[in-house]
């Protein structure tokens, strides 16, 4: 019988690619979502309501692995205190709900894999490279990532192998930064942000999905792993590469930090600060990234449309 993978937030940018990759590999997929939709070939949908701590428990009782991607998008809306709560609760209270259902039913899964972010490390000045042992930041995103990972570790307390994927900026055609920026850059209106010197570790969505699949299949994986290409892409080198891949000039001056801070408030940290992040730990387990060069990754994002089955 096919093994089943339950993906929370599987309807999102990463979840859609991951679903397609898992189906290709012969898994069946269940998705926990807030909005019901008809099942499709190989994909079943289950409903949950994290704020009410309710879910269709069959999603968990019938699965072999859980991948926890759900969370309010951190870049969608300005960070008011209400929005901050939504960003936090959608990640942490959802993990706690999964934990309570696993515990109540004495259900074991083969692995629990949770998304996390390289925002765990906060902003770093200078050339230091963060490894999985680098201490977390005490800004908003750093604290959310710590709590998110701590809630994932509840599953480890049930004897379940638990992996946390500290993800960099994900590049893919169907979502994230490329989808947002490509239309602006196509019109020749792109520019760097702030000093442009802030590091922007990235990963192609195809490699990220391969890493998630490695995390469920490789019994030697547990704990935190950085998911980024270990190069020294900065905001300026990123926007130059994007403009060049689209055949457009980059002629506008950098947008001053002050304007961005006035517009975005605290959320400006996402785009104005950065850090370098090492992926040596996953490489030491034998994992090889297929998209290592930024231009190759961007060209692929700009030309391919992966078949996604659960749109
Ligand atoms: N994309 C990136 O560059 C990046 C980088 C670092 C980390 N990550 C993390 O990786 C995960 C997946 O990223 P993504 O880009 O695929 O995100 P996404 O496109 O925003 O999708 C996230 C999914 O989470 C679910 N969700 C949102 N709010 C929720 C809530 N209040 N309660 C329950 N579920 C909720 C939604 O599913 P339904 O609408 O079906 O309920 C949504 O489709 C996220 O946790 C994100 O923070 C992403």
Image (cartoon, helix red, strand yellow):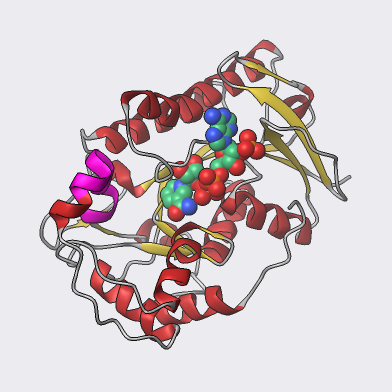
Q: Is residue 221 left or right of residue 133?
A: right
Which residue is rendered at x = 75% and y = 59% of the image? 25
Q: Is residue 160 above or below residue 5?
A: above
Given the current orientation, which residue lies at the most extreme bottom position?
Answer: 247
Between 25 and 126, the one lying in front of the other is 126
Q: Is residue 128 above or below residue 71?
A: below
| Image quarter hosting the N terminus | top right
Please tell me in which quadrant of the rendered image residue 230 appears.
bottom left
Given the current orientation, which residue lies at the most extreme left position?
Answer: 126
Percent x, y for residue 193? 23, 63
Q: Is residue 136 magenta?
A: no
Q: Which residues fall within the magenta stretch? A: 261-273
Which residue is rendered at x = 46% and y = 71% of the image? 182
Camera sees residue 112: no
Percent x, y for residue 27? 78, 51
Camera sees residue 242: yes
Between 174 and 257, the one lying in front of the other is 257
Q: Is residue 308 above or below residue 115?
A: below
- How many labels were placed on the picture? 0
Q: Is residue 263 magenta?
A: yes
Between 69 and 166, the one lying in front of the other is 69
Percent x, y for residue 310? 75, 51
What secondary structure prevails in the magenta region? Answer: helix
Which residue is rendered at x = 17% and y = 67% of the image? 197
Percent x, y for residue 97? 58, 19
Which residue is rendered at x = 46% and y = 61% of the image? 180
Please tell me in which quadrant of the rendered image residue 127 appears.
bottom left
């Amino acid at each position: 019988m096919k093994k089943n993978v339950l993906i929370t937030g599987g309807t999102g940018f990463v979840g859609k690619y991951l679903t397609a990759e898992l189906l290709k590999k012969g898994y069946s997929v269940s998705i926990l979502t807030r909005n019901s939709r008809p099942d499709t070939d190989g994909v079943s949908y289950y409903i949950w309501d994290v704020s009410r701590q309710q879910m269709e428990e069959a999603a968990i009782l019938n699965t072999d692995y859980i991948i926890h991607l759900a969370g309010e998008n951190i870049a969608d809306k300005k960070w008011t205190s209400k929005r901050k709560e939504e960003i936090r609760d959608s990640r942490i209270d959802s993990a706690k709900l999964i934990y309570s259902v696993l515990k109540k039913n004495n259900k074991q899964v083969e692995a629990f894999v949770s998304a996390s972010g390289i925002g765990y490390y906060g902003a770093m000045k200078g050339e230091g490279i963060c490894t999985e042992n680098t201490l977390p930041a005490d800004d908003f995103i750093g604290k959310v990532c710590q709590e998110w990972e701590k809630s994932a570790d509840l599953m480890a307390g049930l004897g379940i192998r638990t992996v946390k994927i500290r993800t960099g900026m994900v590049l893919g055609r169907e979502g994230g930064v490329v989808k947002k920026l490509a239309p602006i850059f196509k019109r020749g209106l792109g520019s760097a942000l702030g000093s442009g010197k802030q590091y922007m570790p990235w990963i192609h969505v195809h490699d990220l999905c391969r890493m998630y699949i490695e995390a469920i299949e490789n019994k030697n994986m547990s704990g935190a792993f950085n998911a980024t290409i270990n190069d020294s892409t900065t905001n300026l080198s990123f926007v130059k590469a994007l403009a060049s891949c689209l055949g457009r000039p980059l002629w506008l001056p950098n947008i001053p930090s002050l304007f961005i801070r006035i517009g975005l408030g605290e959320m400006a940290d996402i785009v104005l600060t950065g850090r370098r992040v090492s992926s040596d730990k996953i490489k030491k387990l034998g994992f090889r990234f297929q998209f290592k060069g930024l231009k190759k990754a961007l060209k692929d994002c700009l030309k391919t449309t992966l078949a996604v089955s659960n749109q």
